[in-house]
Image (cartoon, rainbow, N blue to C red):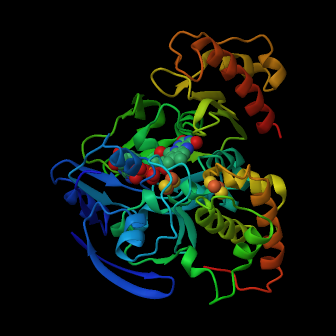
Amino acid sequence: MYSVNYHRASSLADAASLAKKGEARYLSGGMTLIPAMKVRLAAPSDVIDLSHIAELKGVSVSGNSVRIGAGTTHAEVAGNAALKAICPAICSLAAHIGDPHVRHMGTLGGSIANNDPAADYPAAMLALNATIVTDRREIPAEDFFTGLFETALDEGEIVTAVTFQAPSKSGYSKFPNPASRYAMAGVFVAQDQDGVRVAVTGAGENGVFRSPEIEAALASNFDASALQGVTVPSDGLMSDLHASAAYRANLVVVMAKRAVGAANG
Amino acid sequence: MSDVSLTVNGRRVTGTVEDRTLLVHYLREHLGLTGTHVGCDTSQCGACVVHVDGKAVKSCTMLAAQASGSTVVTIEGLANGAELHPMQAAFKENHGLQCGFCTPGMIMAAVDMVNRHPEGLDEATVRAELEGNICRCTGYHNIVKAILAASQVMLKGTAQVAA
Ligand SMILES: Cc1cc2nc3c(=O)[nH]c(=O)nc-3n(C[C@H](O)[C@H](O)[C@H](O)COP(=O)(O)OP(=O)(O)OC[C@H]3O[C@@H](n4cnc5c(N)ncnc54)[C@H](O)[C@@H]3O)c2cc1C
Ligand code: FES
Ligand code: FES
C-alpha cells in the first residue's frame, strides 16, 4: 500500500470538508477500498473514515417504508428482524455477501457507491425502485447506477441512506462464483400493485440492469412456471474466464426462476 | 502518522503508526503478537481473523488507525493461563489442524460463530460459515468436527466465552 493519510470524520459536514483534501476517498467498511489499496489499484492521498458518523447507521421500518443508513453493515441488514418481517429478500441477500468477516465490516453505502458489476445490492436497489439519499439530493436507483463502477455521485458526494417501499413479494437468487462468492448472475424480483420489477447483477457488461423479457413473463403470472421457455438476449452480457455470455444468459433465467420461487415462499 | 490506542487481549496499548499500517501488521510487528497470520493479499483466506469489539474481522483489511479506540482479542488472548480455550482444546482433540497456518484464524472465526449462534450449530451451518477461512491441509472435516464439539462445551456455559 502507498502512503496515505487517515482521517476519522465526526459528522457529515466534517467528512465533506475533509474530502476536499488532495485525492481523498471515503472509507466505510473498507472491504473493497482496502484490498484495492493493498494491491495499489487505488492510491488515495487521504482516506476519510465514515464509520463513526452516527446518522449513517441503522435500519428503520415504519409500515412498509424502509430506510437503511449507508453505514449499516451487511450483518446488521441480514439480522434485522423488522426488515425480515416485511422484506426478507434483502436480508437474505445481505446474509450471502462474501463471508461472515466481510459482513461484519462491509456496508450498503460502500457497496452501492462502488457499483461493482457483480455486487449484490445494486440488483436489490433497482428491483425495489429504491431512492438513494445523499448529503445533497435524492437519486432514483434507476438513475444512480450508470455503468461499470460508475454512479451518478458527484465529487465528494456522500450516500447517507437508501429508502424504499417493501413490495408485497420479493426474492433474490445468485449463482456465486465458487472462489470469490460474487455473483456470476444474480436476480432480484419484486412484485407489488404497480407490477413486477426484475434486476440482474453479475451478468451485464455495463453492470446491473432490468430484464424486460422476465418482467413481461412474470407480469401476468408471478410463478416460476411462467419463465419456462423464456430467453434473455446474450448481447451486452459479460464473457470472461468464469462464463460465456450465452451461459450467463441461461443462468439469468435459472436464477430468476429460483428468485420467484423464494418470493412465493 | 497516527496515534493509536487500543485494548488488546485485556492490555491497554498505545503507539504511533504510519497511517497505512494494517491492523495485522500492528499486532504482529509492533506488539509482537505473531499468532495472527497473513495468508493472502486478497482478503480471502481468513488466516488474519481477530475479534474487534466482539466481532470477527480480517485484520489484513483494516487499518490500525481504523481500529483505534477498539477492543481487540487475538488468538493469544483466548487461553486462560495454561488452560486452553474450549475451541483450542477441541481443535487439538479432533486433529483440526495439520500445518497450523490457518488455525489461529479458524479458531477466532469459530469462537465468533458459536457466539453468534446461541441456539447451537449444525454441520451445514458450520460449513457455510467457514466461507471466509481457507485451509490447504485438512480438507475441513476435522475442523468442522472440532467446532461442533467446542460449541457444545461453550454453550453449556462450562467455559467463559471470549469477547
Ligand atoms: C472476500 C470478499 C468477498 C466479497 N464478496 C462479495 C459478494 O459476494 N457480494 C458483494 O456484493 N460484495 C462482496 N464483497 C464486497 C463487499 O460487499 C464490500 O463491503 C462492499 O462492496 C463495499 O462496502 P464497504 O463498506 O466495505 O466500502 P469501502 O471499501 O469502504 O468503500 C468502497 C467505495 O465506496 C466509497 N464509499 C464508501 N461509502 C460511501 C458513502 N457513504 N458515500 C459515497 N461513497 C462511499 C469509497 O470511497 C470507495 O470508493 C466482498 C468483499 C470481500 C473482501
Ligand atoms: S491474510 Fe487476511 S484474509 Fe488472507
Ligand atoms: S492446517 Fe495447514 S492450512 Fe489449515
At which x and y percent is residue B87? Answer: 72, 73
* B95 lies left or right of A76: right
Please state the quadrant of the image where ligand 3 appears: bottom right
Residue A78 in sight: no
Q: Nearer the viewer, residue B23 or A63?
A: B23
* A80 lies left or right of A42: right
Residue lying at the far bottom of the rendered structure = B81
At which x and y percent is residue B85? Answer: 69, 80
At which x and y percent is residue A147? Answer: 40, 27
- Against B116, residue A90 (above or below) is above
Q: Quadrant of the C terminus of chain B?
A: bottom right
Q: Nearer the viewer, residue B32 or A250?
A: B32
> How many labels sit on residues?
0
* A154 lies left or right of A220: left
Q: Quadrant of the N terminus of chain B?
A: bottom left
- Against B153, residue A45 (above or below) is above
| Residue B96 falls in image quadrant | bottom right
- Against A149, residue A253 (above or below) is above
Residue A97 in sight: yes
Residue at horizontal 83 percent and vertical 81 percent from the top: B156
Residue at horizontal 55 percent and vertical 60 percent from the top: A104
At which x and y percent is residue A244? Answer: 58, 15
| Residue A194 falls in image quadrant | top right
